[in-house]
Image (cartoon, rainbow, N blue to C red):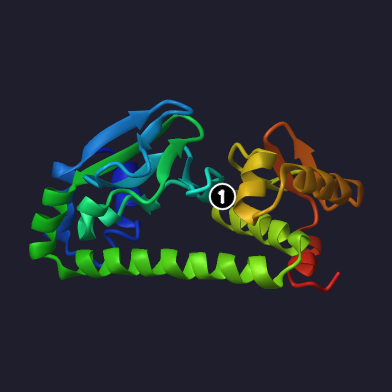
Amino acid sequence: MDKDVQEIVRKSSLFKDVNDAVFHQALETGTLRSVEESGFFFLQGDPAKHAYVLISGRVKMVQITPSGQQITLRMMTPGQTYGGIAMLNPDAGYPATAQAVENSTAIAWSTEQLRRLAENAPALSVNTMQLMHGYILELQERQKALLTERVEQRIARILLKLAAESGRKVEDGVLIDMRLTRQDVAEMSGTTLYTVSRTLAEWERAGILKIGRERVILREPHGLVRIADDLA
């Protein structure tokens, strides 16, 4: 397997601190899977048969509420793990849909493969539980933000989080290096498309952002930090 791919997998939260023997066994047993833009790695409610580490591209995790509302939970970047529930409770089904935002490739391991690997690497089970714990904390933070923060703060925090995960320095500032629609931002910040469009337009006029087609450049990241911390 390509050395760059090995490095991405080795740095993933799923295989952190896993011994070398088990790690190389994981590389041998994992299956590369590619999904074209707008395609799906799995759908919400499907039996959770595989866990994934993203190798290239971008994947968004989307959840449909009982009322039919679509919520974008998070954007996955190369090296991140998704579908970890396959290790713990596959019969419960995936709690969200994994949709490719662009052509994407990931390595997949079945529940059986992961459990066999974990027999010789307890760190694999611990990592999976830490992943689930992280998701729970993230949901708690989202709920807290919805109850206590102004919508501008929530939007600013989402943009700063995405910049931290996939930001790239360009001439005009920091580019959030993924396709990002206003609807995605609205779903992640718990507001409406209209509110996001109005807010981003105001920030662009103020020189904080530069907005392109499905692209956002942070021209003044510190300005967004002040908004996120309610200091503006």
Q: Which residue is mark 1?
A: 166
As helix, strand or loop, the secondary structure at mark 1 comes to helix
Q: Residue at x 77, y 60 (%)?
A: 152
The one nearer the camera, 79 or 181, is 181
Q: Position of residue 217 (x, y in %)?
A: 73, 45
Q: Position of residue 68 (x, y in %)?
A: 52, 43
Q: Is residue 184 left or right of residue 49?
A: right
- The residue type indicated by label 1 comes to Ser
Label 1 environment density (alpha carbons within 10 Å; few <14, some 14–19, many ≥20)? some
Which residue in the rendered view is the most extreme toward the front? 67
Quadrant containing the C terminus in the rendered view: bottom right
> Is any atom of residue 173 visible in this view?
no
Which residue in the rendered view is the most extreme toward the right? 205
Q: Residue at x 44, y 37 (%)?
A: 99
Q: Position of residue 38 (x, y in %)?
A: 48, 28
Q: Residue at x 79, y 51 (%)?
A: 219
In the rendered view, tell whether residue 97 sits above or below residue 91.
Answer: above
Q: Is residue 92 left or right of residue 162?
A: left
| Quarter-of-image position of residue 105 | top left
Quadrant containing the N terminus in the rendered view: top left
Q: Position of residue 102 (x, y in %)?
A: 50, 31
Q: Residue at x 29, y 41 (%)?
A: 46
Which residue in the rendered view is the most extreme toward the top? 36
